[in-house]
Image (spheres, helix red, strand yellow):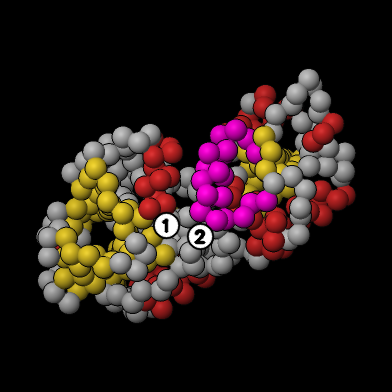
Amino acid sequence: MRPEQLLRPTPNGLYCPPGDFYIDPVRPVERALITHGHADHARAGNTHVLATRETLDIMAIRYGDRFATSTQTAQLGQRMEIGGVTVSWHPAGHVLGSAQIAVQKDGLKIVASGDYKRRDDPTCAKFELVECNVFITEATFGLPVFRHPDDREEIAKLLKSVGQFPDRAHLVGAYALGKAQRVIALIRQAGYQDPIFIHGAMQMLCDYYRSRSIDLGRLEPATIDGGDKAKFAGKIIVGPPSAFADKWARRFPDPINCFASGWMRVRARTKQRGVELPLILSDHSDWDELTDTIKQTKASEVWVTHGREEALVRWCELNQIRAKPLNMVGYEDEAE
């Protein structure tokens, strides 16, 4: 069996003909296997959805309980048969509930990694390396310039600034699913015990993370009662990046704009967003982690779904690994 007979790109997403299912489809389909809950991978409208318990719950929070006609829960480490194809689920280390999906038939094994990162994250299961014949990887940060620093160093920068400017609020931009909870958990690991204030758009997801026994410490809503700005002086407020462009961000005392993203490595992006304190924190693998993962899977062929495909494909070719870009449309850098 050739790899394209087991899994192939289509306008609807990655399709498995013998199993008659899609992985992270970009349009509604009959049967969808979902790697994680970010909106560019998990869309409403599919008939039957198979995903981890956390991903199904996150989809219900985001889209409502009727996001699919029916759902089925997959456990990390579980193997199942779908139309004669063996499907197994493995931690991706990206966000809570994220999974790599391995499909196997007639001795051929393909791993669709979705989005993934290799470093430890207190808010989700650690990435599990799965050896395979074909590895399907993202390339969000697939350029050699992207080498993420130690998470603890970035959080230390934030806490140092909080200490240096006790009269200013620190506004941390972080995506509502995954990044926000990880930033909060890392701040707690660094020993910060004061309340952390959060934008209302993050409340339900933070509550859900805590329901899954993830300690985020004391969280309070970032609301101002009676115009009392002073209570936010010297405090940390976490909100979605979109909120920083409207009047919500201007309610805080002399705010220091921070943004937690792998893109903060790029000075032009920092300047474009008006970020005073960039925090290079990403839920995606950097260049070294991408290339190390490819080598460790022992895959003889690599498919690149989205991101900086050309550089990663060229690296594979230089290392005698067959590779090609899939040129998948519809996947964005939501969790950058």
- Labelled pair 1, 2 in contact (Cβ < 8 Å): yes
The kind of residue tagged 2 is Cys
Secondary element at image label 2:
loop
Q: Looking at the picture, how far across and down is residue 209, in whole percent?
A: 53, 50
Relative to 153, is 307 on the left or the right? left
Dot placed on the residue nearer the N-terminal end, 1 or 2: 1
Q: Quadrant for residue 299, please give it.
A: bottom left
In the displayed structure image, the side of residue 320 where residue 269 appears, left or right = right
The residue beneath circle 2 is 124
- In the image, the segment drawn in magenta is 198-217
Residue 98, label in figure: 1
Across and down, in percent, residue 198 comes to 65, 39
Q: Which mark is residue 18?
A: none
Neighbor class of circle 1 (other Cα within 10 Å; few <14, some 14-19, many 20+) is: many
Can residue 176 be seen here? The reply is no
The residue that appears at 55% across and 67% down in the rendered structure is: 119
Whether residue 54 sits left or right of residue 19 in the image: it is right
Q: Is residue 1 above or below residue 309?
A: below
Residue 316 visible to the viewer? yes
> Residue shown at 70%/56% (left/top)?
188
Q: What is the crowding at mark 2: few (fewer than 14 residues within 10 Å), some, or many (at least 20)?
A: some
Per the picture, the main secondary structure of the magenta-coloured stretch is helix
Q: Quadrant of the N terminus?
A: bottom left
Instruction: Report the amino acid beneath label 1.
Output: Ser
Q: Position of residue 146 (x, y in %)?
A: 56, 61
Residue 156 lies in the magenta stretch: no
